Amino acid sequence: MASASILLWLLIAICVSGQTTTINAFVKLECKTDNVGKYGHQSMLNCGIITSKEAKDATVKMVIWKKDGVLLLGFTEPSYNKTPRFSFTESWKKNMNVSLLIANTSVADKGVYTCEVLTDRSGGSTSTNLYVAARYSQPTILSTPVDVSPKSQVTLTCSSEGGYPMGRLGWLFGPTRKEIRSNETEANVTQNGLFHLSSKLNVPPEENASDYTCVVFNATGGEDGNATLLSPKKSPSLGKPKQSTDLVTKIMAPLVVLGALIVGLLLWKRISKGCFQGFRRYRKTEDAEPGNPEEQVTFGSQCEENS
């Protein structure tokens, strides 16, 4: 039953296309030539029926939307035939707006769509394009190795994903953000049709890795995001952080030695005076019985006793 219904729709569409390739002056179908849909969001293909004064009371009998010959959405008074995610924008019976809405736009939705209409005056068809775009994620940079020894080479790896159409990664140097030599961008298509981009850059030992910025450019050349390697991640041999550490070490080392000498001198002075805290001595109490002396244990400081 379902296949018979679809066949009927296709037969009607063929008839309309064959009879009204060119719409007469009374009724005209106008569609926006190019439309851009955002991945994961709702997209709209703009189409409307334009009528002359003589045909302002025209009645729509049929509207069909197809892509690659497959029926997506159709109306033949009084029934609808549609597939999931595709719908009309509004009640076109009032304003002749037959635009197509696509929910949760995917990469597979890009391409050429055909709209066909039939009124009680005339009919016709026209095509419109849908382009799908997705913004790339903020790029990330990894350093290999993370901790490097002096005069060693660092390899920076930049990556970004989730974009469409295919973009590229670029490397900028210094505060002027001058793009350096061209580095190849490796692009891989993910399961959902989006792109994953990656690029590697070898930083010479005498240069600072944090002076390089990775930028992800979309298909139109616009910048979707950028990233710079944080200073703590870079090699100690790549500039200022190592100099700062050496300066602190040079200042602290003499202070530690001086402090140790002062503590040693104070201890030697107390030892030379015979001062020992917690010195234990014993003495007999005056009221102790003969033959059974009572010993009293006291604690004090020998240096206090000598003084």
Image: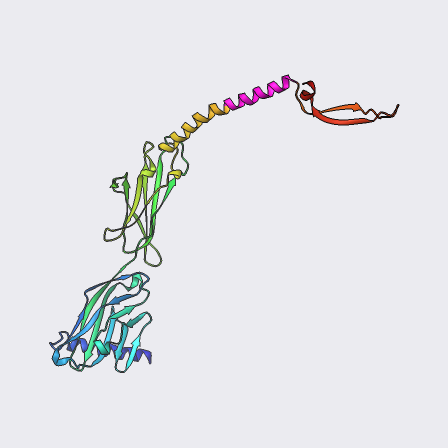
Quadrant housing residue 98: bottom left
Quadrant housing residue 7: bottom left
State which quarter of the image contains the C terminus: top right
Q: Nearer the viewer, residue 243 or 303?
A: 303
Quadrant housing residue 238: top left
Q: How is the image coloured?
A: rainbow
| The residue positioned farthest toward the right in the image shown | 291
Overall secondary structure of the magenta stretch? helix
- Where is residue 157 shown, x and y percent of the image? 35, 43
Q: Is residue 285 left or right of residue 147?
A: right
- Where is residue 130 shown, x and y percent of the image? 24, 63
Q: Nearer the viewer, residue 207 or 260?
A: 260
In this rendering, is residue 87 above or below 79? above
Q: Is residue 136 left or right of residue 62?
A: right
Q: Is residue 234 left or right of residue 98?
A: right
Identify the residue shown where x is 38% and y is 29%.
243
State which quarter of the image contains the N terminus: bottom left
| The residue positioned farthest toward the front in the image shown | 287
In this rendering, is residue 177 above or below 29? above
Identify the residue shown where x is 77% and y is 24%.
282
Q: Is residue 19 left or right of residue 272?
A: left
Check if residue 227 falls in the magenta segment.
no
Q: Nearer the viewer, residue 249 or 11?
A: 249
> Quick check: can you spot residue 228?
yes
Check if residue 271 falls in the magenta segment.
yes
In this rendering, is residue 61 above or below 271? below
- Where is residue 57 shown, x and y percent of the image? 17, 82
Q: Which residues are magenta?
A: 257-273
Identify the residue shown where x is 40% and y is 27%.
247
